[in-house]
Amino acid sequence: MRYTFSMINILRLDLRSPLFFVKDDRIKPFVYIADETLFCFKVSPDQAGRIEPETECFLGELLFGARRVSDTAEAMAIELPAGTYLFAQEREALSQEDWLFMATEVQKEGLWERLTLGDNVYLRCLFEDNSVVTQVFRPYWIDTVSTI
């Protein structure tokens, strides 16, 4: 399925508490498993500030793959940090192409709103109400420059 901008609901999310995971090098992005998973990618530096990023060049290095575990002590190794994010989700398993399209639309929205975007983008997959949910998290900050 190829998404269009009008179909994606991009929200500002204030994540008040981190979500904890444990690193797992065996899991792969866009291969859906029964566990909740989190992947963190660097955004390619040459695409990071572009209002029209090239989807096929958008992602840089995969920094980690992790899965959610019930034992909090074990899970403290990796986290989706508390903070402010641009956030989008779809209630289905997305292909890499569709997720990248959603991630680039999140970037476009952030740049359009003149937000300072983080260098990383997160892919989170989970099961909710008996279906797969695929999410994008992109950290952002609002510049508070005084114009006195």
Image (cartoon, rainbow, N blue to C red):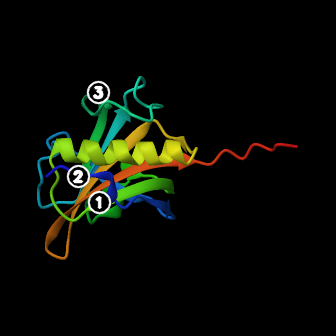
What's the residue at 42%, 43% (across, down)?
Answer: 107
Distance Cα–Cα, label 3 vs label 2: 18 Å
In contact (CB < 8 Å): disc 1 and disc 3: no
Element class at badge 2: loop
**Whole-percent x and y of residue 111?**
51, 42
Q: Amino acid at mark 1?
A: Met
Q: Which residue is mark 3?
A: 57
Q: Is residue 105 left or right of residue 2?
A: right
Q: Neighbour class for label 1 at 10 Å: few (<14), some, many (≥20)?
A: few
Disc nearest the viewer among 1 and 3: 1
**Whole-percent x and y of residue 47?**
40, 28
Instruction: Say which of 35 and 22 sits in front.
Output: 35
Element class at badge 1: helix
As drawn, which residue projects farthest toward the right?
A: 148
Give the mark nearest the N terminus, 3 or 2. 2
**Whole-percent x and y of residue 105?**
36, 46
Res. 116 mark: none
Distance Cα–Cα, label 1 vs label 3: 23 Å
Q: Amino acid at mark 2?
A: Tyr
Distance Cα–Cα, label 1 vs label 2: 7 Å
Q: Which residue is mark 1?
A: 7
Count of marks overlaid on the render:
3
Instruction: Say which of 122 and 57 sits in front.
Output: 57
**Whole-percent x and y of residue 88?**
35, 57
What's the residue at 62%, 48% (across, down)?
Answer: 142
Q: Which residue is mark 2?
A: 3
In contact (CB < 8 Å): disc 1 and disc 2: yes
Above or below 24: residue 92: below
Instruction: Say which of 118 and 3 sits in front.
Output: 3
